[in-house]
Image: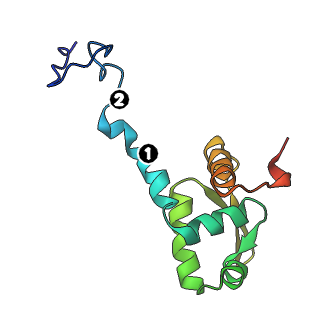
Amino acid sequence: MPEALELPHHHTGQSNDPAKNLPATARFEPVAQVFKQLSDAGRCRIFLLLSHSEECVINIAAIMDMSSPAVAHHLRLLKVAGLVTTRREGKEVFYKAAQTDLAREMHRMIERVMHLSCPETKS
């Protein structure tokens, strides 16, 4: 067991070792990666769209007023983060928000921050 950290300042009421239960920096990497993917307003908007509908790249590009390559780039990043999934139908690939706790929490967070109410997600 590592020694207790000796802090330079001692504050009244402070626990002996406030860092005792703090996970190592490396454990925060998955969290940082998810937030990195949602740090772009366009990606957040795409994710919100896909939380309510399944769409192909061409339709997403038209809705977002973006180029297909730009949309494809954003979708790739959202997929790597585990926030969207794909379904192939012939040559067409459809995207939608993943049915995971992580994706549902990200959707709820967007709703709260933007003061939105998405009736399809309410139970």
- Residue for badge 2: 23
Q: CA distance from mark 1 to mark 2?
A: 13 Å
Q: Quadrant of the C terminus?
A: top right
**How far across and how far down the image is residue 3, in percent?**
17, 14
Q: Amino acid at mark 1?
A: Pro
Numbered disc in front, either 1 or 2: 2
Q: Residue at x 68, y 47 (%)?
A: 104
Q: Nearer the viewer, residue 72 or 5?
A: 5
**How far across and how far down the image is residue 31, in percent?**
45, 45
Q: Residue at x 28, y 15 (%)?
A: 12
Q: Please, is residue 47 above or below residue 16 in the view?
A: below
Q: Quadrant of the N terminus?
A: top left
Q: Amino acid at mark 2?
A: Pro
Q: Residue furthest front?
A: 12
Q: Residue at x 52, y 59 (%)?
A: 38
Q: Which mark is residue 30?
A: 1
For label 1, the SS is: helix
Q: Nearer the viewer, residue 64 or 16?
A: 16
**How far across and how far down the image is residue 14, in percent?**
31, 16
Q: Is residue 30 left or right of residue 103?
A: left
Q: Residue at x 15, y 19 (%)?
A: 6
Q: Nearer the viewer, residue 116 or 67?
A: 116
For label 2, the SS is: loop
Residue 95 found in image quarter: bottom right
Q: Nearer the viewer, residue 78 or 119?
A: 119
**How far across and how far down the image is residue 78, in percent?**
55, 62
Q: Residues within 10 Å of mark 2 (few under 14, many from 20)?
A: few
